[in-house]
Amino acid sequence: DTAVSQTPKYLVTQMGNDKSIKCEQNLGHDTMYWYKQDSKKFLKIMFSYNNKELIINETVPNRFSPKSPDKAHLNLHINSLELGDSAVYFCASSQVSRATDTQYFGPGTRLTVL
Amino acid sequence: AQSVTQLGSHVSVSEGALVLLRCNYSSSVPPYLFWYVQYPNQGLQLLLKYTSAATLVKGINGFEAEFKKSETSFHLTKPSAHMSDAAEYFCAVRNAGNMLTFGGGTRLMVKP
């Protein structure tokens, strides 16, 4: 069983469209995250979310919004896609209540905006 | 705020040679440090982590890292490189919000 899964694996779309990327974890973790990896492989945190608190990286445009239907899912919705949004997006999860928690990553979604 | 610097965006070694990937961190509190590996077109896999216990940390696939507070370093080593070690390696520090701040990554190339 895949611990952290994402769909779709590849997403190609036009500028201006709205799209969502889904993430599910079956580890029973209490916190989920979204990271963006740009073309130079640089990884940057976008959001951290548990059932109590959403922490947003201040550099993330408000066109990006995480939506969590339940504890095991954290979807990423993107409005009005721009060329610069092209990247690989990784979902991760961890159990923050453990002092030495480890984040487990999904396989990534490669988004291409044309 | 915490930050991580990885010296050398590309490192090339011969098969069987020592692997040394450098990571320096900046943190105002005792850090939790991680090394992740990313194989082509895959997600990140945890190699090892430092959580204020032993300063020499052993990970998977024969990798280890030593936490040196005086040098603010957490370099990753492996005594003998294999072809299968070719990948992108990321050092990361966990911040107060439990989010990871990553270094810029080091691509390891292994020559036959």
Image: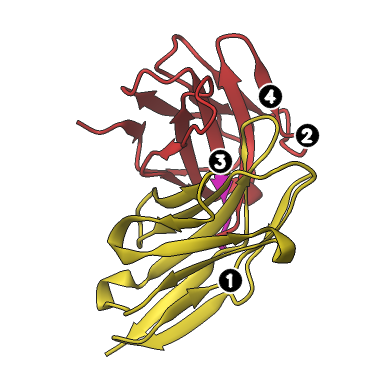
Which stretch appears magenta? Answer: A35-40
Q: Which residue is labeled 1 in the image? A: B22
The residue at which mark 4 appears reads as: A55
Residue A35: image tag: 3
Secondary structure beneath dot 1 equals loop
Decide: is A92 above or below A86.
above
Residue named by callout 2: A58
**Do badges 1 and 2 share one subunit?**
no
Q: Are marks 3 and 4 in contact (CB under 8 Å)?
A: no
Reply above or below: B82 against B88: below
Name the element at disc 4: strand
Magenta-colored stretch includes residue A106: no
Residue B35 or residue A60, whichever sits in front: B35
Kindly indicate whether the residue at mark 1 contacts the one at mark 3 (C-beta within 8 angstroms): no
Asked if residue A1 lies left or right of residue A90, the reply is left
Q: Nearer the viewer, residue A4 or A67?
A: A4
Name the amino acid, label 3.
Tyr
Q: Residues within 10 Å of mark 2 (few under 14, many from 20)?
A: few
- Residue A69: give x, y in percent of width and height: 46, 10
Q: Name the residue at 74% across, 47% down.
A: B2
Q: CA distance from mark 3 to mark 4?
A: 13 Å
Q: Mark 4 to mark 1: distance in Å? A: 30 Å
